[in-house]
Amino acid sequence: MARTYLFIIAGILLTLCVISPTSAQTSKSYEFIPAPDIWYNDVDGIRLGVRLKGQVPGTFDDGPHRLDAGLWLSTWFPDLPVSYYISFTEPIRRWSDFGSEANIQLISSVRTGYARQGAGFNKRWQQGFDERRYREISLFNSYEKRFDREYAAFPELWSDDDKFLSSVSANFQDENRFGFYTVSLNGSLQYLNQNYGFGSVTAVQRIPFNDNWGFRLRGFAGSSTDNTDPEYLFSRSSGQAIHTLSSGVTRAKGTIPQPWIESGNFHVAGGANLRGYTEQDINSFLLDRCDTCLFDDPNDLEIALFRSFLAFNSELDYPNPIKSLFNSIPYVADFITLRSYLFFDAGSTLGSSNTSGAWIADGGAGFALSLNIPDYLGKPRGFVIRYDIPFWVSDPDSGDPFEFRSLIGFGAVLSF
């Protein structure tokens, strides 16, 4: 905890330096854009603060010396009532071109019970002015630690070990004869305490027939080595626990009411995405022992987490009158849409355990409301709220495989 307080003090001093009016007045070639910020979770209560953007005037998040920072005070005054986030990005001019930037990024963050300090290198290649066709690669080294599991919706999914991670990720998006596709690869090695590694690959293909009909196909494979901490293991229904930190909605318990989460009727997109197994996974997180779950090794794991998983997801879009209404209003369809679809998910554990190769599946229907305001690179930036009805699961805990089940979802299962 002493180390965490040192990070807090250093982060506050740095944030105050860049926020100070004196700094803003020393140069007309740089500007700071502050904005008030308010949020809520069950540990901090109402969290009040300020977000700060720093940039060269007129560059719109696409110039040198880019700063994204925040400083907050928790009104319920937990053990650590002050939190911060700072990201500084500096382009490397000799390796950059329009739409194809290379940069160095520094990140320091202590918030919602998690500390992260790191530095990375990012490079993007874009084909001309078409933001839909690009390649990206990122290399990142970081020190990370969950120092307060009270913030976690499911503390069982987290360790409190110190970690030093070397991570690499690559993203590709382009078009083939069927439509646009994306491929994402991620891998990390952890060096402190027990050494381990983990990684995943995700591929998405969109096959539109027209404006209303089309297929969306997705494949996912994830694997990890022995001794991997639980926040990097894989569940059947959602992503790794570590990915909940990437969104303010899921970063800490209580932003989404905890009873909703524990009911098993709320689904966060990611990972294997067998959405029909959300309730079974959540129930296992709440129990001291789950004897009915598919484990790689039941003697090692007490909850429905897996060291490896392979999954496929598919959705068939079909027309609905609300989407047609949005499409009839000029410009509205560029920002908001309502999809209607039928879905089918299937997956299996991998490895040498007795459960390896035992495929499970689900199917149903759903609706997704999307609000999207693309960023300066044309990438989606917004949110997706889903209502899914997985009326069939192949391996229910109890009852009939055909049964009415409903899920409220956050995030797109098959984005694009």
Image: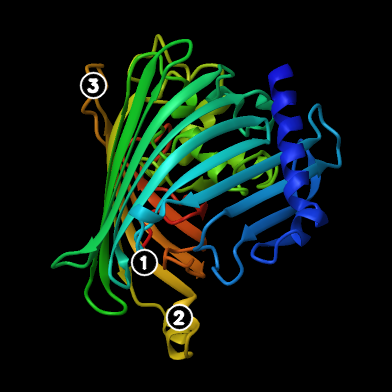
Give the quarter of the image for residue 12.
Answer: top right
Look at the numbered discs 2 and 1 and tell me whether their residues touch, using CB distance below 8 Å.
Answer: no
At horizontal 36% and vertical 57% (from top left) the residue drawn is: 96
Between 229 and 7, which is closer to the camera in this rendering? 7
Q: Which residue is label 3 attached to? A: 351
Between 252 and 50, which is closer to the camera in this rendering? 50
Looking at the image, is mark 2 or mark 3 earlier in the sequence?
2
Q: Which residue is label 1 attached to? A: 98
Q: Callout 2: few (<14), some (14-19), or many (20+) C-alpha neighbours within 10 Å?
A: some
Q: Which amino acid is tagged 3?
A: Gly
Is residue 265 at least partly visible in the picture? no
Tell me if residue 6 comes above or below residue 135 in the rendering.
Answer: above
Q: Which quarter of the rendered picture does the C terminus lie within? A: bottom left
Identify the secondary structure beneath mark 3.
loop
Give the quarter of the image for residue 117.
Answer: top right
Tell me if residue 92 comes above or below residue 337 in the rendering.
Answer: above
Mark 1–mark 3 Cα distance, whole angstroms, equals 45 Å
At horizontal 38% and vertical 44% (from top left) the residue drawn is: 273
Q: Which amino acid is tagged 2?
A: Ala
Between 142 and 97, which is closer to the camera in this rendering? 97
Is residue 247 at least partly visible in the picture? yes
Position of residue 285 in the picture relative to residue 6 (left or right)? left
Which mark, by number, is residue 3?
none
